[in-house]
Amino acid sequence: MAGVNFPFVIGNWKMNLTPYESETVAKKIVAGLPPEGLPIEIGICPSYPAMERVQRVIAKTSITLGSQNMFWKEDGSYTGEVSVRMLKDMGCHYVIIGHSERRIHLRETDYEVNKKIRLALQYGLVPILCVGEKFEERQDGKRDVVIMEEVANALKGVDKFSQLIIAYEPVWVIGRGEAIEPNEACSAIGLIRYTLKDIYPQKTIDDKIKLLYGGSIDDKNITDFVDNEEINGVLVGGSSLKPEVYIGMINNLAKHVS
Ligand code: 13P
């Protein structure tokens, strides 16, 4: 059962599994979770071609479907793109927007990120905005300015929403196998909250915006992060592809929060 203050565990499967493999992993995750609801919001973001199969597997569970991306126009001649209406039709609830891998490999800009967020919200999808600094930016002491600019640019003109998720993912920690210290994640997330204060009333931030950490989270370190009041959950890459690890993360967190 979904609850307003449950921590989030959202898996981003990236471009890793075929539809068949995705279905198999989803089935294992479903089979490994207790039948009764957990005090956790669980999401899975498979690739586009796998969405329908995964949705069928998770349909009667408390796991929610998300997308890894969407296009910033509603419809039209945009060969190869996937629209927000298509995602709604597939049963998506979340959509990851502005992941660093898209910013780096597909040159996605803050301008496009902003357009996508606005369109996602218009159609009732919950955006998961990803922000975070690259290693060189961190070395140059630019962590804070990168985070603040990415948040402010992404949210220009974004005023009506029932829920918005922002994930702090330091780019250099993604896939590294070793997370940053939880207090460092808290400081970055604190900075995001501080940036949001220039844009929204405190009540909107407290009630409607959830802040996640992402980067080398696994079943061993998840509780160290979600233990902190600042952090409302995690966005998980590699560990979400391994059913036993993903289930372990969720179960460890459930023991911790209940
Ligand atoms: P890893 O958990 O593999 O570091 O990936 C994090 C991520 O990019 C989630 O979006």
Image (cartoon, rainbow, N blue to C red):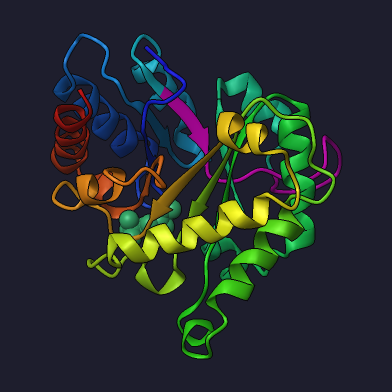
> x%, y% of residue 119?
78, 37
Q: Quadrant of residue 247?
A: top left
Q: Most extreme residue toward the front, as rendered?
A: 202
Is 219 displayed left or right of 239 in the figure? left
Up-down: is 202 above or below 36? below
> Does residue 220 show up?
yes
183 and 140: which one is in front? 183
Quadrant for ligand 1? bottom left
The residue lying at 22 percent from left, 33 percent from top is 250
Question: Main SS of the magenta segment?
Answer: loop
> x%, y% of residue 96?
56, 45
> x%, y% of residue 178?
23, 67
Is residue 79 highlighted in magenta? yes
Quarter containing the N terminus: top left
Is residue 158 highlighted in magenta? no
The residue lying at 86 percent from left, 39 percent from top is 76
- Residue numbers of the magenta segment: 64-81
Is 185 displayed left or right of 201 in the figure? left
The residue lying at 73 percent from left, 62 percent from top is 110
Q: Quadrant of residue 150?
A: bottom right
